[in-house]
Every structure is written in structure tokens, then in C-alpha cells.
Image: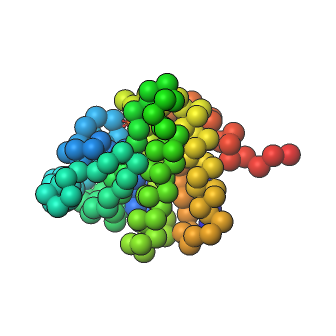
Amino acid sequence: MEIEVIKGDITEIQVDAIVNAANTSLLGGGGVDGAIHRKGGPSILEACYAIRNKQGGCDVGEAVITTAGKLPAKYVIHTVGPVWNHGNNDEDLLLESCYKQSLALAVANGVKTIAFPNISTGIYRYPKDKAAVVAVSTVQAFSEKEKLDRVIFVCFDDENYALYNRLLTPEG
Ligand code: ADP
């Protein structure tokens, strides 16, 4: 399984599934969530409403899957990252769970290629360096046992891009 890092806009990435940093309501918000709903069109929100009606939204650390509407991807996997609270609320475990649940949902739906944004590092204020360590280590641990072809970390800002490159560059 390849693990890549690129700088760019996740709504433009051609993969089987892109991951959305959603909120518990699943009804859209700012940041990457806003961009995905804006570009993907109303069918994503309709699918989110259907999930809400069935299970009442999505808890922190959990993930759900919908159509990707008009986006180049086939699916959007919506996961809800933790709001950073000085590390006092098991944020690391919850963020790890976001990556794990998203990857498990991808495998269950036949996804081979998946792109992640830097979950929780925007409006939810998770320190970027700490979040990058959780993201990379969780995906690397998963890559040893599961069957995806490619995981792409899509960084929107220079700081995240530099952090991920540092973590993913082989030593020596
Ligand atoms: P959260 O509420 O989980 O912090 P945000 O959407 O505010 O979610 O931010 C998560 C990350 O997504 C941030 O690093 C932000 O810079 C990044 N981001 C915002 N828009 C996009 C986009 N179009 N593509 C990829 N990443 C994006």
C-alpha cells in the first residue's frame, strides 16, 4: 500500500473515496466540509439527512459513507474529529479512531484509493504536529494488514505539507 502526501484541494482528487472532516450534525459546516458540499452538490447533503434520520448524526471518532455527488471521487466518508481541548479529552484516541473507522469503512465498500484531509486541524484547533503524528502512525499501522492500494494525505496548507513530508520521508 502506497502512502503519499500532496498539497492541494481534496475536492479535486480522483480517488475512490475522499474523507470529510464533518461535524456531528452531518449537515455541513465551514472548512473542508463546506468545500465538499459546495462542489459535490445537494445529493451529499440528502444522503447525510438520510443517515441522520436513521441513526441521528455521527459521533466524534466515528465515520459514515455517502455518495460523492458531482465530485470526481465515488464516495465521501464523513468522519467527526475531536475538538482540541488541551489534550484532556482523549483527543488522540478519538482522532486515531477517525482514521481507523474511515479506513475500515473504505475496505468494507471496496474502496482501493482514499484521500484524507488533515482532520481536526482547522476549526477544531488540534495542534498540527500532534495530529500529523496520529494520522501517519495510524495509517502506517493499518497498511501492514489491510488491503488498500493507496492512501493520500491532502494538505491544504504549507505547515501540514511540511509536517507530513517529514514524517513520511524514510530516514537515512
Ligand atoms: P476541523 O473542524 O476538523 O478542524 P476544518 O475543515 O476546519 O475541519 O479543517 C481541517 C483541515 O482541512 C485543515 O487543515 C484545513 O486547512 C483543511 N482544508 C480546508 N479546506 C480544504 C480543502 N478544500 N481541501 C483539503 N483540505 C482542506
Camera-side residue: 170 or 25? 25
Q: Is residue 58 visible?
A: yes
Residue, x 63% and y 58% (percent of image)? 141
Indicate the quadrant where residue 144 lies: bottom right
User: Of residues 133 and 159, which is closer to you in this image?
Assistant: 133
Where does residue 115 sit, x and y in percent of width and height?
47, 55
Q: Position of residue 28 (x, y in %)?
A: 23, 43
On the rendered structure, is 158 left or right of 19? right
Q: Most extreme residue toward the right, as rendered?
A: 172
- Residue sitting at the far top: 86
Ligand number 1: quarter of image? top left
The answer to whether any part of residue 11 appears in the image is no
Residue drawn at the location 62% of the way across and 63% of the way down: 143
Q: Depth check: 60 or 72 in front?
A: 60
Q: Residue 105 vs residue 53: left or right?
A: right
- Residue at the far bottom: name it: 110
Give the image location of residue 24, x and y in percent: 27, 44
Q: Is residue 57 above or below residue 143?
A: above
State the residue at coordinates (33%, 35%).
Answer: 31
Residue at figure coordinates x 58%, y 55% from the top left: 139
* Quadrant of residue 106 within the rendered picture: bottom left
Side of 103 where 43 appears, left or right: left
Residue 114: give x, y in percent of width and height.
47, 60
